[in-house]
Image (spheres, rainbow, N blue to C red):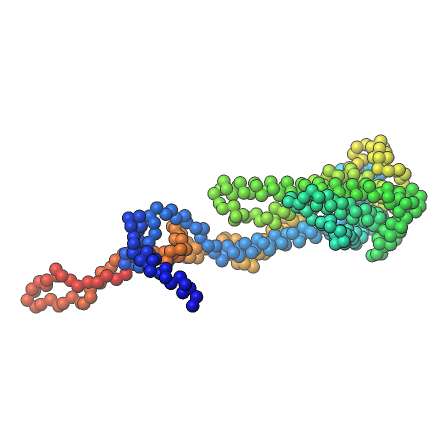
Amino acid sequence: MAGIEDYHNYGKYKDLRADTGPGWEPAFPEGLRPSRSIRPKELELKPRAPPRSPEEDEEAVVRRYVGVGVGLATLITENLLSHPFVVLRRQCQVHNLSHRYHLVPITLVPVIIHLHQRQGITTLCKGLGSILLVRGMTLAVEDLISKFTPWPKEVNADSSMKAIGQHILLKCVSLAIVTPFYSASLVETVQSDIASEKPGIFDVFKEGVVRLVSWGSPQKGRMLPVWALVTPTVMYGLLKYVVCLFTRGITSRFLHSQRRALRERQGAFPREMRQSSEDIEITSSLVGLVAADVLLFPLETILHRLHLQGTRTIIDNLDSGYEVTPILTSYSGIRDCYRTTVQQEGIPGLYKGFGALVLQFAAHVAVIKLAKVMLTELGRLLSGGGSSNGTPKAPSPQEEIITESFRPQSYPYAQQQIPPYQHQQYPRYPPPEMPSNNTPVDESHPQFFWTH
C-alpha cells in the first residue's frame, strides 16, 4: 500500500498540535473553527496580491489583440501605404538637373496634384510588385544560405562574436546576389508611365538575370558593371541594417526602463503595465527605421544614381509635375558621383526628396495611431468594458470587498475570511406564563445556549 512505509512516524507527529507552547496561538477564534490549528506568533504574514477579476482578464486580452492588430497595420503601412512616398523620393534623388530639391513636404503637394491630374491616381503605385518581389527574394536567399551553411539568420545580445560575424557575412552575400534585381526594380519605380511601357509582373527577374549574366562588362552605353555596384549596395544595406538594429535596441531598453521607473514611483506593481511590450517594440522599430533612413539618405542618393546610370530611363519632371525628362549621367564610381553632386548641386543636392521622407513617416505614425485608437475602441465595445455614454462600468459587489490579509496556503481554512460574528443569545424554551396572583418568576438561572 502506498505510504505504508511512513506509518511508523505517525505516532511521533500525531500530538504535535496539542503541544502548544507560549510561542503559539490559535489560528481561529475559540468556538468558530477547530482551535487545534496553530501558528507562530512571530510569523509575519505578507498579504498576497488579490486574484485578477474577469474584467481585468478581458482587458489584458483586448490589449494583446490590439498589439497584434497594430503590428499588422505597421507591416502593411511599411510595405504598401508608404510606397507612393518612396516613388516620389527616388524620382527626386535620381534627377540631377532638377531646380527644386523638395527638402520640405509642402513643395511636393502641387507636384502630387499635377501628377494625379495628368497620369491618374496609380502614377505613384508603379514598381510596387517588383519591390515586394525583391524583398521576398532577399529573405529567400538568406534562408537558403543559412540552411546550407552554419551562418545564423538572427542574432541577439547573447550571441558570440563568431555568430555575429557569420550573420553579417550572410547579409553581405545575400545583398550581393540581389544587387542586379534591385537595379531592375529601381528602374520600374522611377520611370514615367506616359513615356515608357508598363513592365510585366516578372520583368524584374528577366532584367535582373540579364544584368547578372553580364557581371564583368556593361551592356550598353554608360551603364556600370554589376561588380561596381555590389560594393555600394552591400555597404548601404549593411549600414542600414546595423543602424536600425542598434537604434531599435537602445530605444527599446530606454522605453522599458522609463515605464518601469514611472510605475515604481506611482507605487504600482511593474508587471501590470498599461503600455504593453508590443507597443514598445513597434515604437522602437519605427525609431530605428527613421534613424537609418535619415542618416543614410546621402548614400542612398548616390547609390540610386549609380544604379540608374546608362539604363536610358525617362522620369517625371518633379519641378512642375507636367513634363518628363531623361536621365543622362556619366559617373565612374561612388567617389566621382559624390564629388560631382557636391560641385554641381551643393550639399543639399544629396538630400533631394527629403520632404517625401518626412511625409512617409508622418503618414506612418498617423496610420499607427489611428489603427491603435480604432482597435482599442472596438475591443472595448466587444468586451463590454464600458457603457454607451462612455462611463466605466460599475464594479460588482465582489469587487468592492477589500480583504485586509490573506492567510498562507499551508494552514487549514486559509482562504476563508472570518467575519467578526457576535454571539447572540436565544432562549431554549419559551418563558413561562405569569401566574394570575402576580407572583414574580425566579429568573436567576435561565436556560440559554450559544449559537454561532
* Depth check, front residue: 452 or 228: 228
Does 197 appear above or below 249? below
Residue at the extreme right of the image, as rendered = 221
Q: Quadrant of the C terminus?
A: bottom left
* Depth check, front residue: 40 or 351: 40
Is 168 positioned to the left or the right of 3 in the image?
Answer: right
The image shows residue 126 at horizontal and vertical percentages of 80, 51
Residue 291 in sight here? yes
The image shows residue 160 at horizontal and vertical percentages of 67, 44
Q: Residue at x 67, y 52 (%)?
A: 73
* Depth check, front residue: 4 or 286: 4
Is 298 positioned to the left or the right of 21 in the image?
Answer: right
Residue at the extreme left of the image, as rendered = 437
Does 18 appear above or below 217? below
Q: Residue at x 50, y 53 (%)?
A: 391
Q: Quadrant of the N terminus?
A: bottom left
- Which image quadrant for residue 323? top right
- Which image quadrant for residue 286? top right
